Amino acid sequence: MDAAGKDGGSAPPAAHRPDSWGLLPDVQWQRLSWRDLLHYWFVQFNPLYFISAMCILFGVFLVARNIETLAPKSPERVQLVLFAVIQAYEWLLIGGAALLAQRARVVRPAVILALLEAVFLFDCTFRLESIVFIGPLAYWLTAAWFLLTLLKVRLLAAALRLRLPGRVLAAVGASALGIVVAIHWLSQPGTDKLLVLQLAAWYGTLVMVLLAKRLPAIPSVFAVSEPQVLMAYRCIRGGFRLLVAFYFYHLWSYILLAAGPEVTGPAILPQAGAFLLLQVALRPRDVDIWKFAVLTFGAALPAPSAVPYAALLLAAVLGYRVWGGARSSLAVAAALAAYTGAWLFGMTTWSDPLPRLPALLSWQSVGLAAALAAIAWRLRDPLALAALASGAVYLGYRHGASWLPESELAWGILLLAVGFIALGAGIAINWWFRGKAPPTAAASAADVPGASAAESDRADR
């Protein structure tokens, strides 16, 4: 926010930054009092908040690293204390932001505290990972952390007088829930960690896509002028980007620091699928979407258990683009991706043979045929017709011999049935084109010079 417009108080009117450093205000050679300097340093550009946050982060790191020395018999108790310390610090950040914004009427420092809370909100100190192994109490604590996260967001919005839409709160809550589920899932013995990491990355990317595509304007009563509105918008966007960054911070920290070599290498490449998926959802051109969709599917190949989920997620994203107005062959790609995901679901390794294709009358095959027929009918997509024709040719090649009759009696019944069907088709065609003159006869009558009406009538007959 603009300091002069919203910080209030008796700030020196000529306190403007002379350069990019801003160590001293530009007061046009006037003598500055200590009060003016302190106001400039600690109201407009207060460094104490960042110093405080760095001290908290480094202090938690040091205590956690030496926890065995501090409490050799009950390290879990110290982990709970550290968890409570971080929660208390977050509440102080929110309370300080509310006090500064609503009581002291200094908005800039309140915004700084709010951005610091965005850093701590998604547990940048890994306290959730530390308490997940302390037994059944861990589930209650992580559930409490999730509910407190929602409450913190609401109170922080109230402190800065932001009108926060419900879907934004739901997106933040969904991200927090994804962190909790991923941490508990990874802590279970025998978990397919590659699959969990890939699903968590896609889940976070999906939430990010929804925020990027549907993030509404979040006005604040403190932003009145146009520069203040622009600054508020940037701060709000910055806060959401911090939340996204710390969501993935948990995943990548596990890959780089906690996972073994059997997970680290294969997990790095599939994580790129999350960013490729983001491009699939946000790119405006259909040809770019095709490229990134192929890259997304390819990025999941190193983790075989994640391939079916990648195909299903691509089907959902591509279907969303078609629903949003894309009139191209993306609909066919979505249908084929859904079929592939359903076909490969349950696959765990490339060393085993691929599952058999679904049967002709299975729900997967019937659903694919129905989807392609609907796409061909509603969108007039030639690719859907080509896919249906290819499927019919394949079925004829694969099962044609078993469909042909084996006895003369069966052949006779089949020919009778074909006769009735052909008759019905002929009648239907004549009914459909009723009242329309044959174009060849009409053309011959019109093109012959001097043709009489009788000749034309004979030609029509």
Image (cartoon, rainbow, N blue to C red):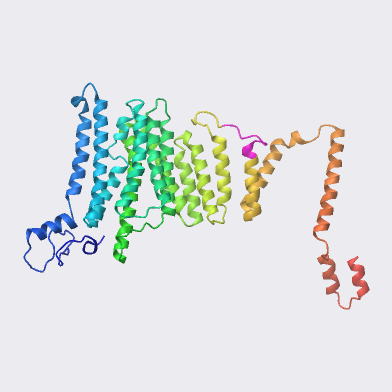
Q: Residue at 34% across / 50% down in the picture?
A: 241
Q: Is residue 356 magenta?
A: yes
Above or below for 240 versus 23 = above
Q: Residue at 63% across / 37% down in the picture?
A: 363
Q: Which quadrant holds residue 263?
A: top left
Q: Which quadrant holds residue 358?
A: top right
From the viewer's perspective, is 285 left or right of 92?
right
Above or below for 252 versus 218 = above
Q: Is residue 316 magenta?
A: no
> Which quadrant holds the C terminus?
bottom right
Q: Residue at 55% across / 51% down in the picture?
A: 330
349 or 89: nearer the viewer: 89
Magenta span dominant secondary structure? loop
From which residue to which does the magenta span run? 355-365
Question: Is residue 268 visible to us here?
Answer: no
From the viewer's perspective, is 434 left or right of 347?
right
> Which quadrant holds the N terminus?
bottom left
| Horizontal and vertical percent position of residue 377 | 66, 53
| Horizontal and vertical percent position of residue 24 | 12, 60
183 or 308: nearer the viewer: 183
Q: Which quadrant holds residue 419?
A: top right
Q: Residue at 9% across / 59% down in the picture?
A: 35
